[in-house]
Amino acid sequence: NPFGLNADPSSFKGSNRPVERVSWEDAQIFLTRLNSIEQSAGRLPNGWKYVLPTEAQWEYACRAGTTTMYSWGNNINSSRANYNWDGGATDGNDFKQTRNAGKYATNPWGFFDMHGNVWEWTSDWYKGAGNTAIDPTGPASGSFRVLRGGAWSNDRTYLRSARRHKLAPHLRFFNLGFRIAFQKVLPDTANPELVLFGGAAITRHAGQAWADPGVEAHDARDGNLTAKITVAGT
């Protein structure tokens, strides 16, 4: 295990429980290795890969054609999902940990636990409200990744289909997990684009130290490629 991943990171053990205490970065390593293993074994169809869903894809799957607060309607109780339904009381009536997948009914499209159990990382960087695009993706960079769905530790308001949460991608907690998606790889038909910060022309006074304002690279299929930029010359 050259990446230092914990083989059994979850606080709550059980073969059918969702994994937790995994960061967004851990999930990316897992997906890279999963795709490599499945491709080598001949089980991964050409042009397909396992990914984290975008935030928009996650909500689309969660809602399953509904417009209500939850995929089953506007009311919630402890028979619907795993959440902190008694407000944290210690009377023994609440289940203060994850539960097995399949414990609760699916949403209309057959997905389990879109509400509650663990927060689920999505692929997107966090962006504030106001995006009206159809099937949008997040910004090319940022400080926080988006999570969706709420968890066993949250009250019912955090489980709404529209509720958003954001955390730094290196963080791990006992209520953070992920759900993988299976996605067709888009054909690579567009060249990547470089964006130079500071404008096309920059004036500097003689004798002052030069500070490169930076650059970003974006690609229609592969997203943010900034980390792959190399700089040579003077």
Image (cartoon, rainbow, N blue to C red):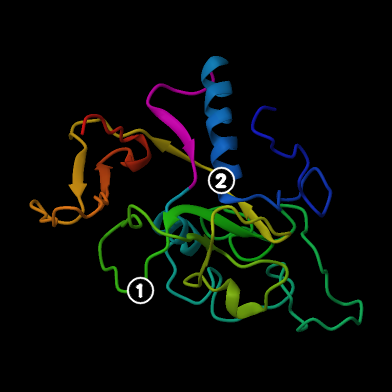
Instruction: Name above or below for residue 89 compared with residue 79.
Output: below
User: Which residue position holds label 1?
Assistant: 129
Name the residue rendered at 50%, 72% in the picture. Answer: 163
Picture quadrant where residue 38 is located? top right
Q: Which residues are magenta?
A: 43-52
Q: Nearer the viewer, residue 165 or 186?
A: 165
Picture quadrant where residue 226 is located? top left
SS assignment at label 2: helix
Mark before the other along the chain sequence, 2 or 1: 2
Name the residue rendered at 71%, 53% in the picture. Answer: 21
Image coords of residue 234 (percent x, y):
20, 34
Name the residue rendered at 80%, 63% in the picture. Answer: 97
- What amino acid type is highlighted by mark number 2? Glu
- What amino acid type is highlighted by mark number 1? Ala
Name the residue rendered at 30%, 32% in the picture. Answer: 230
Instruction: Name above or below for residue 189 compared with residue 39.
Output: below
Q: In this rendering, would 139 be left or right of 233?
A: right
Asked whether residue 208 appears in the rendered view, the answer is: yes
Furthest residue to the left?
Answer: 201
Q: In this rendering, would 79 be left or right of 147?
A: right
Tell me the quarter of the image containing the N terminus: top right
User: Which residue position holds label 2?
Assistant: 25
Instruction: Name above or below for residue 213 compared with residue 78.
Output: above
Q: Nearer the viewer, mark 2 or mark 1?
A: 2
